[in-house]
Amino acid sequence: MALSGRAAAVALACVLVVLAVRSAVTVLAIDGLLLAGVVADLLLAVPVSALRLARDGDSRVRLGETATVTISLANTSGRTLRAQVRDAWPPSARAQPARSPVRVPGGGAGSITVTIRPARHGDCVADRVTVRSFGPLGLAARQRGQRLPWTVRALPPFHSRRHLPGKLAQLRELDGQHRAVRPGQGSEFDSLRSYVTGDDVRSIDWRSTARRREVLVRTWRPERDRRIVFVLDTGRTAAGRVGAGAVPGYPRLDAFMDAVQLLTALASQAGDRIDLIAADSAIRGRVLAPPRTTALAVVTDALASLQASLTETDWRLAVAAVLTHAHRRCLVVLLTDLNFSVDLLPALRALTARHELLVGAVADPRLEELAAGRGDAASVYAAAAAARAIGQRSSVSAQLTRLGATVVDAPPDRLPAALADAYLTLKARGRL
């Protein structure tokens, strides 16, 4: 049972009458009338047990977008339902409205709509639906909660989608659809075409030229069906936020996810296979060789459930997971921060011996700003700390380069496009 605000207002009015009359009989009469009204409302209110509730709506939504969930109410009683419905969600779901009034005639059906705009990626799980069924006077209500399971998965945003058309155009050039490419290690023969001024004479096919009596050159394209393994660091450094740039306070893990989505979309169009391994002190997620047509959706769905862990990453475990699944030479895209770790370089040495390694890291633009500060003593100390951090990152990057890795260290808004360019460059050079 629940009393409404109207009941409280009526009770306050009755108190004012009692204070004015000051009669025991008046007090009893007013209390009796108020109690009778409350009891009558409870008796005439539609029982909540007579309602049949069902839920429907969106189960996926991109972070920053809005999902819609609908609750249907079927009134199996013969009386009109006057109710208030509350659909409980976690605060991060930012569900609106918090409460919805509904009126359903006897034997009829109605519905309410709740909009979900998640504040962070992951699963938003509905708790319970609470219905308050009011009587005709609106003084009291029958109340009951019911669990209606529903989950809306908030997918990570795909801000770098705007770069995809341009990168696909570069890929088409590599594939020989816009121009011929010179053969490199790992390039495949594509077709023959007539020689034009400026073509490399080494591409002339002399046998075909002799048969056709015109100069023909071979065109090439990068090999397809290569394998790309994403290794996503979900350790404590991935939980850090970069404090300046296009997106202030942007978590490194979110930048990693954005880069993975862009590279997945690009590699799928290039005909390459995708694997994903997320690791910190344990393996947090795996996606192995999804179909190319659904690779982006599968990878994005897997990324949504990942959260950064405040633990050190076990690099030996992560590398062992890659070597277990990837037996033939492939491209390993490692997304981490360029912080010194005791077991990072020894573990990656075993990786670069068998695979091509591309390392992507999120640079904090604020370090450059702090390093330039000289206004007062505090600025000088901050500049010294920033210069030391920049030097450490450069040292780790240089060591990775000596191991044979390609290192991309860029701010969060530029990292996805920079990694895509590095992937296309490796593909054009036949290093995949």
Image: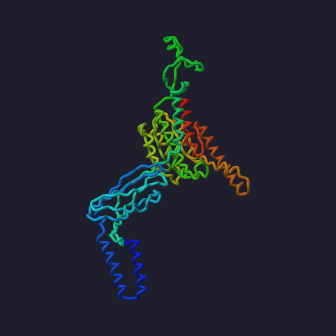
Q: Is residue 274 visible?
A: yes
Left or right, 389 with reference to 70: right
Position in image of residue 97 (x %, y %) = 43, 60
Left or right, 253 with reference to 89: right
**The N terminus: image quadrant:** bottom left
Q: State the image quarter where residue 12 is shown.
A: bottom left
Task: Establish if 138 lies above or below 248.
Answer: below
Please name the colour scheme applied to the rendered image: rainbow
Residue at position x 55%, y 49% in the image? 252
Q: State the image quarter where residue 72 is shown.
A: bottom left
Position in image of residue 428 (x %, y %) = 55, 30
Position in image of residue 291 (x %, y %) = 41, 37
Q: Is residue 316 visible?
A: no
Task: Establish if 315 lies above or below 7.
Answer: above
Task: Establish if 247 lies above or below 40.
Answer: above
Q: In front: 396, or 138?
A: 138
Position in image of residue 213 (x %, y %) = 51, 11
Total numbered badges shown on the rendered structure: 0
Left or right, 152 with reference to 390: left
